[in-house]
Image (cartoon, helix red, strand yellow):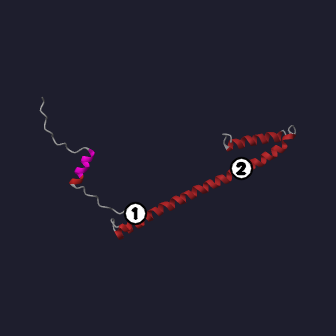
Amino acid sequence: MPSVSYAAMMRQWELLLTSVTANAADLPYVSEYRAQLEVELAGLKEAIQRQTTLQAAVQQETREVEGFLQRGNVLAVNIKAGVRTRYGNRSDKLVEFGMRPLRSRRRVTPEVKKRKEEEKGDAPQTPTTAEPQS
């Protein structure tokens, strides 16, 4: 496809058709092509009109889809709030509704903390006695 806009292409075709029609006596051998180009130009204009109409319809449908999504999200949030109100934030029943229950954090005991520090190598080193120099 050439990198020329539809409008520019149609203007070129219309100019060409006007010129060929004006000089029909000199160009009898292109009359068949002229007729075919007139048909193609008319088809192109109709197709562009349909395309424009469909684009407007697509934009309208997109706005409707976005509206449904927005209203649906508000309703889903309200339903989830109702479920949390009924069962509580920590109930395992929330999983059934696709929600994550709140869990308490694990307490880290001093023994576990010390073991983790040793694994990392951050544990405080016990001082060693200096060896006598000879």
Q: Find residue 9 and report its image quarter.
A: top right
- Farthest front residue in view: 134
| Magenta region includes residue 94 | no
Q: Find residue 128 and report its image quarter.
A: top left
Left or right position of 109 against 7: left
Label 1 Cα neighbours within 10 Å, binned few <14 / some 14-19 / many ≥20: some
Q: Amino acid at mark 1?
A: Met
Observer-side mark, 1 or 2, equals 1
Q: Amino acid at mark 2?
A: Lys
Residue at 84% over, 41% down: 30
Residue 94 horizontal/vertical position (percent): 38, 66
Q: Which residue is mark 1?
A: 99
Residue 117 horizontal/vertical position (percent): 24, 47
- Farthest top residue in view: 134
On screen, residue 96 above or below 16:
below
Q: Which numbered tag is attached to residue 60?
A: none
Bounds of the magenta segment? 113-120
On screen, residue 116 above or below 2:
below
The N terminus appears in which quarter of the rendering?
top right
Query: Along the line of sight, which residue is nearer the eye, 88 or 81?
Result: 88
Residue at 71% over, 52% down: 46
Secondary structure at badge 1 equals loop
Q: Which numbered tag is attached to residue 45?
A: 2
The C terminus appears in which quarter of the rendering?
top left
Secondary structure at badge 2 equals helix
Left or right position of 71 against 86: right
Q: Main secondary structure of the magenta part?
A: helix
Left or right position of 132 against 113: left
